[in-house]
């Protein structure tokens, strides 16, 4: 029997989303530079450079580290998450930075929005945390307008992802960066699985790209050890190991689909 995924950390560690010294900050420092320009390029392709009329929902928004990026693009942004403490942190951070974001506490599998409410929906770094992720996709499709865009990033279920994400980053005392059961390998999602689930909800994948650390493995290991020994912050580690777009989908991958009906 596989262990239960530890989604409690998003309440327990909610105060650390914007903290350079905390592992949750890796999403901002390491992952955002990979995904934010990619999603912005897709948005401007379909909606032009003025995105002020684009209504976008960020599902599983956590502390708002991606949500705020969409708001800074001038989108009309809403964010939803099951963690009350993460939503409180996200709202406080947005208010402090003068960003207007409609944050809600709620279930990704039962969104409190009318059908066809949004031009775009993002669902990033969260599908692999939800047992009924296909219902999340169905809800995203429901609240999207016809022609709307669905953005995703997730982790592929491969031997490489087991070695890196589970054995390396969770289980090994030498390289462990994350709490136990932050991820469960069996819950990772293959590109074929997500493509099929999207197609079942009337969405067609337009593009998919992988993520790659540009450094060689030894240099990467050195940086991880520097963080483990307290010589650099998680923020600095993320900047050193920033993900780049790549054709290899065997670890992290992202993409977008378009609602066709």
Image (cartoon, helix red, strand yellow):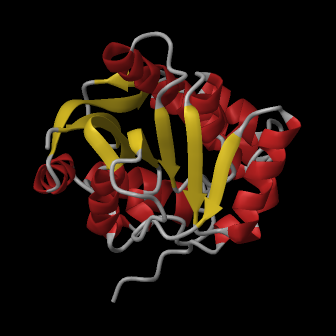
Q: Residue drawn at (32%, 23%), measured in percent from left and top?
A: 246
Reply above or below: 70 against 131.
above
Quadrant holding the N terminus: bottom left
Q: Quadrant of residue 236?
A: top right
Tell me: 254 left or right of 224: left
Reply above or below: 74 against 208.
above
Residue 96, position in %: x, y? 88, 38
Tell me: 224 left or right of 165: right
Is residue 144 visible in the rendered image? The answer is: yes
* Viewer-side residue, 36 vs 225: 36
Residue 141, position in %: x, y? 28, 52
Tell me: 157 left or right of 211: left
Q: Residue drawn at (73%, 41%), measured in percent from left and top?
A: 234
Most extreme residue toward the top, as rendered? 49
Most extreme residue toward the right, as rendered? 96
Is residue 230 visible in the rendered image? The answer is: no
Quadrant holding the C terminus: top left
* Viewer-side residue, 40 vs 78: 78
Residue 257, position in %: x, y? 24, 37
* Viewer-side residue, 181 vs 219: 181
Most extreme residue toward the bottom, as rendered? 1
Q: Residue drawn at (57%, 34%), measured in percent from left and top?
A: 76
Residue 157, position in %: x, y? 27, 56
Q: Quadrant of residue 21?
A: top right
């Amino acid at each position: 029997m596989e262990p239960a995924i530890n989604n409690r950390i998003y309440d327990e560690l909610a105060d650390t989303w914007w903290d350079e010294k905390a592992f949750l900050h890796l999403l901002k420092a390491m992952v955002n530079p990979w995904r934010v320009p990619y999603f912005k390029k897709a948005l401007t392709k379909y909606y032009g450079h003025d995105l002020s009329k684009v209504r976008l929902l960020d599902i599983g928004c956590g502390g708002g580290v991606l949500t705020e990026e969409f708001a800074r693009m001038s989108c009309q942004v809403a964010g939803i998450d099951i963690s009350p403490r993460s939503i409180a942190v996200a709202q406080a951070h947005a208010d402090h930075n003068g960003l207007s974001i409609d944050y809600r506490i709620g279930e990704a599998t039962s969104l409190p929005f009318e059908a066809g409410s949004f031009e775009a929906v993002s669902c990033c770094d969260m599908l692999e945390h939800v047992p009924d992720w296909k219902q999340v996709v169905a809800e995203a499709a429901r609240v999207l307008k016809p022609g709307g865009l669905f953005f995703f990033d997730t982790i592929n279920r491969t031997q490489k992802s087991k070695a890196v994400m589970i054995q390396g980053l969770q289980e090994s005392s030498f390289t462990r960066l994350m709490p136990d059961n932050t991820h469960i390998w069996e819950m990772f999602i293959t590109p074929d699985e997500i493509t099929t689930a999207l197609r079942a909800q009337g969405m067609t994948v337009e593009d998919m790209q992988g993520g790659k650390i540009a450094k060689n493995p030894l240099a990467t290991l050195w940086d991880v050890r520097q963080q483990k020994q307290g010589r650099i912050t998680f923020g600095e580690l993320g900047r050193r190991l920033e993900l780049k777009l790549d054709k290899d989908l065997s670890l992290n991958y992202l993409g977008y689909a378009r609602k066709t009906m």
